[in-house]
Image: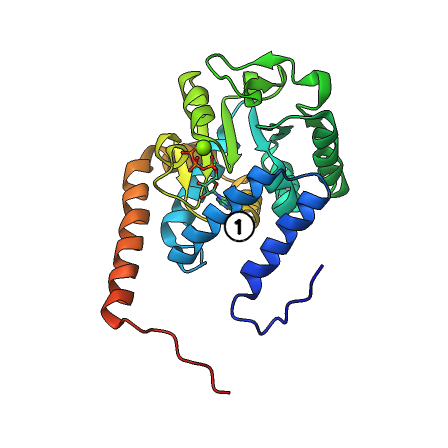
Amino acid sequence: MISIPPSHPRYKSLMLRERIVEGYKRRLVVLEGLIAHGRGEAFDYLLGEETRGFALKAARAGVAAMLLARHPVISVNGNTAALAAEHVVRLAEATGAYIEVNLFYRSREREEAIAEELRRWGARIILGVGDDASATIPELQSERRRVSPRGILVADVVLVPLEDGDRTEALRRMGKTVVAVDLNPLSRTAQTASITIVDNIVRILPVMAKMAGEMKEWSRDRLSGILEAYDNSRILGEAIGFLEERLRGLAARGVFLELPKA
Ligand code: ATP
Ligand code: MG
């Protein structure tokens, strides 16, 4: 890995980029995943690379949905495994969710590499690998239609970090609650999920694991109350409105970065 000094103004973002490239070299991530990461980076730049209130509210509702679920599943793709495998495992433990590998570009080698990365962080049961991905989601053409009959097929709540719009819609049509993490509030995923968390998976998944640790002690009534009061359309409106206001503020100033002293 190249070395980036922690004092670099774009340190965190560059480190994530290195992790994705590293994930590509380890065959977790495909080339298309690098492009998807770049699209995420652009939206994170606009968000100011911080977790905002609308993301926290959505994350809380997402955790409540997972804790109330009969059969919650966390869907993992290559980018998620490269960037946040540890946090996926912690969140699964805290919510009792299954972990399932689900890939747009499937190969046995990639499935195994991703499962191995999850095992490295302590995951024991990993669905969707090899013959386990034997069921299909109706209407979907991509390899992502292949799911585990013990996992996504029978899940009532599916957490999808970095999902594709087509599959989000297909899962919704199957009657599932879809909790999505997507930096782009305008994507089809963000727009069609039941609960949309507009944030970077590397920031919000650890927060969700911590929330779940506390919220799992709460009564079902209290958790249901959170879901009943939750309005995804309002949250998406807040996210889009935040971008608008932030850009308006920056636009008013024009130059807003000081040239560092030589
Ligand atoms: P959709 O299919 O939902 O319309 P899209 O086609 O624009 O979305 P994809 O290429 O399918 O986008 O998937 C990439 C999505 O993942 C983008 O919306 C991007 O914002 C988001 N994304 C990428 N990296 C991250 C990350 N680290 N955390 C959260 N979201 C991310
Ligand atoms: Mg897409």
Q: Where is residue 99 in the image (x, y as percent from the top left)?
A: 64, 30
Which residue is identified by label 1? 207
Q: Position of residue 133 (x, y in %)?
A: 65, 18
Question: With respect to residue 213, does 15 lie above or below?
Answer: below
**Residue, x 70% and y 29% (percent of image)?**
111
Which residue type carries mark 1?
A: Val
- State left or right for residue 255 relative to residue 11: left
> Ligand 2 appears in which quadrant?
top left
Using a 10 Å C-alpha cutoff, classify the residue at mark 1 as few (fewer than 14 neighbours), some (14 to 19) or many (20 or more): some
Q: What element carries label 1?
A: helix
Question: With respect to residue 191, does 153 lie above or below?
Answer: above
Question: With respect to residue 194, does 175 lie above or below?
Answer: above
**Residue, x 52% and y 15% (percent of image)?**
137
Q: In which quarter of the image is residue 49?
A: bottom left
Residue closest to the eye, 240 or 21: 21
Q: Can residue 231 be seen in this view?
A: no
Q: Quadrant of residue 155?
A: top right
Does the beta carbon of the residue at mark 1 sit less than 8 Å from ligand 1? no
**Residue, x 65% and y 49% (percent of image)?**
21
Q: Where is residue 88 in the image (x, y as percent from the top left)?
A: 62, 41
- State left or right for residue 245 relative to residue 52: left
In the image as oriented, which residue stretches furthest toward the front? 31
Q: Can residue 189 be seen in this view?
A: yes
Q: What colouring does the structure picture have?
A: rainbow
* Number of numbered discs visible in the structure rendering: 1
- Where is the N terminus found, in terms of image quarters? bottom right
**Residue, x 44% and y 25% (percent of image)?**
166
